[in-house]
Image (cartoon, grey):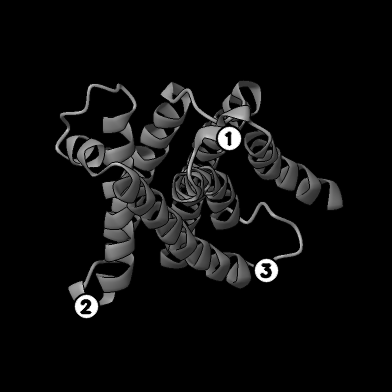
Amino acid sequence: MALIWVALAAAVCVPIAAAAASPLLEWRGPVYILAGFAGIIALGLMLIQPLLIAGYLPGLSAYRSRRTHHWIGGALVVAVVIHVGGLWITSPPDMIDALLFASPTPFSPWGVIAMWAIFAVALLATLRRRMGLRPRTWRIAHRLLAIVIVAGSVVHGILIEGTMETVSKVALCVLVLAATVRVMADLRAWRRRATLRDRTDVGASSA
């Protein structure tokens, strides 16, 4: 049990520590550094989210896993806002180009797409009861947006050549992608088995 938490902490913290040791930080201002680390933290939070929703983290009940998933989702939104806001403060023209998909840098559009998908999930999660979204509709929308978030964030992170150390960055991106794919496959299999079991129970009771 402890090894799982240690491995998760290492996967999230090692890239942060490696970035903190980057010599490139010497030429960056504090706002830019804060924005950069907010982005790294956001990527780390994306590794935790699928593990929580699938109940893979030991010591947490299903209820606590869901609640923690909600809170970390909020923290992810805050981290993205700090990331984007800090970059806006340091270079408004670059951020305008990025938001308008006019930036010459190849990583920008992927980050913008992931950002809007994160905001969309947060908005749907906040308003889904008022909107009357059915649980199935919410799950499908959440799953599709999660795919966009993870894919966009991973490509965004891989393409950036900055303070993040390459090996730890690639490892974190691979883990985020692998965890998301594995959890989505498992959740789909669990729901399929539950549906078959319900159909079997209904057939048995009818007989």
Residue 124 picture location, percent across and down: 27, 63
The amino acid at mark 1 is Glu
Residue drawn at point x = 56 percent, y = 29 percent: 24
Whether 123 is drawn above or below 100: the answer is below
Q: Which residue is mark 2?
A: 130
Disc ID at residue 26: 1
Residue in front for this viewpoint, 157 or 1:
157
Question: From the viewer's perspective, is 81 left or right of 183?
Answer: left
Q: Secondary structure at mark 2?
A: helix
Q: Which residue is mark 3?
A: 61
Residue in front for this viewpoint, 36 or 193:
36
Whether 166 is drawn above or below 190: the answer is above
Residue drawn at point x = 26 percent, y = 48 percent: 116
Q: Looking at the image, do the residues carrying marks 2 and 3 touch, with CB atoms under 8 Å apart?
A: no
Q: Earlier in the sequence, mark 2 or mark 1?
A: 1
Instruction: Determine if residue 140 is in view.
Output: no
C-alpha separation, residue under disc 2 versus residue under disc 3: 28 Å
